[in-house]
Image (cartoon, rainbow, N blue to C red):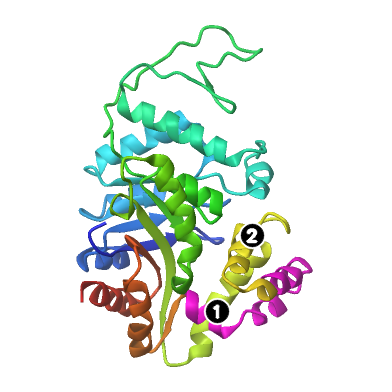
Amino acid sequence: MAGMRLGLALGYSGSHFSIDLGFVQHAERLGFHSVWSAEAYGSDAVVPLAWVGAHTSTIKLATGIMQLPGRTPANTAMTAMTLDHLSGGRFVLGLGTSGPQVVEGWHGVPFGDQPLGWLREYIEIVRKIFAREAPLTHHGRRYRIPYDGPDASGLGKPLKSILHGRKDIPIYTGSMAPKSQEQAAELADGMLLTSMHPEHFGVIDENVQRGFAKAGGGKGYDRFDVTPAVSVVIGDDLDACRLPLKMVLALYVGGMGAKNKNFYNAYLRRIGYEETAERVQELYLAGRKNEAIAAIPDRLIDELNLVGPKERIRERFSVWKGLPVGTLLVATAQREALELMAELVQA
């Protein structure tokens, strides 16, 4: 990556969904590299990008992430190529398995015991479709193309995409767990991190370096985009700035996954917040959400995000600038925060 660039996080819906197009267009005018749309079990990640793409001209349109269980690899490749064509080559494909609660509880398909193998197969199939070097075939553990299972008709045949897609559409993966980070560095063009402690980058770097070694060919950070999300809230009242971020972090650390299968909780433990991770999860799963929120230390919010008066944010941002972060994914509702981040990155 040639220096740090900025992405804008749209997130996913609550009970209602809308997009402030003027806000996105302002980010585009400020030089933001990309806008990222997410999905959980409500709004999808692709339709918002089609809407944004029709009202912008230069900003990249990225999914952060499209869930594997929601689409076959072929359907994802079709969607990616179509939106990439219509946007003039602006699409970025972010992929992830999601967790077992959503995979099985919402999409109704098995999570399985090898989620990284599932993601590996998925990426391989999507890349084959993009490349159009031969009709599509794949014989893996999760996918068999043409399908040849016991209930197959026997009429399936290998096909090649009618649409000629861009072969190098970038692929990113959502990668909070160590093995996932290693695989991202091996297979993908970048990885998305829901949160990252800038002073503990080493716990990520060691995984990424193993992936680079597996990839070979001298792969390094110059060809791999580390994309962490950071919330930016400008204000003089630090408690007011921190509160919504504590609410979100409590949800992720306490309730985004089962007790023994929560990637965000595990990450806090790896950066030295074992007691906080355990306590927040215990309270959240017991239904004591307000107590879980209160159990998040102010210091942790300050370390993972950029909050407070502008000068305080300027000072804290200096820690981020020295890291091999290609795209800093900004989550904010403030125009002045977009402007401040653009100024800091360009300084």
In magenta, the rendered stretch is 277-304
Position of the C terminus by quadrant: bottom left
> Can you say whether 134 is above or below 248 in the image?
above
Q: Are marks 1 and 2 in contact (CB under 8 Å)?
A: no
At label 1, counting other C-alpha atoms closer than 10 Å, the crowd grade (few under 14, some 14-19, many 20 or more) is some
> Can you say whether 9 is above or below 72 in the image?
below
Numbered circle sitting on residue 300: 1
* Amino acid at pointer 1: Leu
Position of the N terminus by quadrant: bottom left
Mark 2: secondary structure:
loop
Does the magenta-highlighted stretch encompass residue 282? Answer: yes
Numbered circle sitting on residue 22: none
> Can you say whether 101 is above or below 272 in the image?
above
From the viewer's perspective, is 58 left or right of 62? left
**Residue 153 showing in the rendered view:** yes
* Amino acid at pointer 2: Met
Nearer the observer: mark 1 or 2; the answer is: 1
**Residue 64 showing in the rendered view:** no
Instruction: Determine the CA span between mark 1 and mark 2.
Output: 18 Å
At label 2, counting other C-alpha atoms closer than 10 Å, the crowd grade (few under 14, some 14-19, many 20 or more) is some
> Which residue extends farthest bottom?
236
Q: Earlier in the sequence, mark 1 or mark 2?
A: 2
Instruction: Where is residue 240? Give x, y as percent.
Output: 52, 87
The residue that mark 2 highlights is 256
Does the magenta-highlighted stretch encompass residue 9? Answer: no
Instruction: Where is residue 86? Give x, y as percent.
Output: 26, 40
Instruction: Where is residue 300? Give x, y as percent.
Output: 55, 79
Q: Residue at x 55, y 49 (%)?
A: 179
Question: What secondary structure is the magenta-colored segment mainly?
Answer: helix
Query: Count the marks: how many?
Result: 2
> Which residue extends farthest top?
154
